[in-house]
Image (cartoon, grey):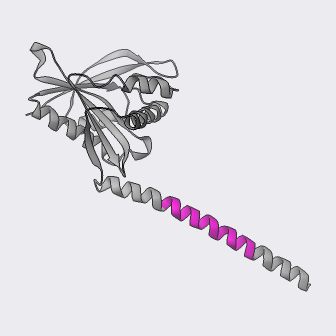
Amino acid sequence: MRSKTVKADKVEVYNFNLIFVYARILIKVIWNISEREVNIMNNNFEIIELKELTSETLEELSLLLMDVVNSGASIGFLAPLSLEVAKEYWSKVLHDGVILFVVKVDGRIIGTIQLHLCMKQNGKHRAEIAKLLVQPNSRRMGVGKTLMEAAEKRAVEEKRSLIILDTRAGEVSNLLYKSKGYIEAGRIPKYAESTEGGLHDTVIYYKIIE
């Protein structure tokens, strides 16, 4: 009987130690996530305008684009998006009339947006917002809103009074644009193909800014 009791005690101690180890791992994971989320929600991040792309930045932006596309977003690419294709895209982004912002948390890019200034003689009053990307696990924390505000502020500085943009119908981004005062100008049916092969409408928005 004693030997059985000793064996049972050892099993109980072993199980307790195992639970303790798992608990420590879980607490560490929760702490890391909470710390990142708190930094974002408290606006503890940098908004930077990029005028050139280093190899490191090119890699980060490419991985961000892959994450967003492969999570189902419709931004001109189809999943699965390869790193090679993503890098090719970003390597050609910066040119006259394109202003590129990124958001960094703890030195890591978690979001980006582009402001395209119309370069036509009769369009110097307008600009277009393009490629608003937020890392999937950093959404719903105000990152997209902050990027939109940065782009709009720069549009005003560039003396642009009209901003246009488009997005796939049904995307969560529609709610963001409407909350920022963008007005739906119309829809184009069956405009963009999805990864699944279906054709989706796109919604065109505009906003007059002072």
Q: Main secondary structure of the magenta part?
A: helix
Q: Residue at x 26, y 34 (%)?
A: 177
Residue 191: image location, x then y, percent: 37, 15
Q: Residue at x 36, y 49 (%)?
A: 107
Find the magenta span and give its range: 13-30
- Magenta span includes 51: no
Q: Residue at x 10, y 34 (%)?
A: 157
Q: Nearer the viewer, residue 99 or 68?
A: 99
Q: Residue at x 30, y 39 (%)?
A: 102
Residue 182: image location, x then y, percent: 21, 32
**Residue 57 found in image quarter:** top left
Classify the position of the C terminus by image quarter: top left
Q: What number of labels is visible?
A: 0
Residue 179 to residue 190: above or below: below
User: In the shown orientation, is residue 204 left or right of residue 118?
Assistant: right
Q: Nearer the viewer, residue 172 or 52?
A: 52
Residue 43 to residue 88: above or below: below
Q: In this view, which residue lies farthest toward the bottom?
A: 2
Classify the position of the N terminus by image quarter: bottom right
Residue 79: image location, x then y, percent: 50, 26
- Magenta span includes 26: yes
Residue 193 to residue 147: above or below: above
**Residue 17 found in image quarter:** bottom right
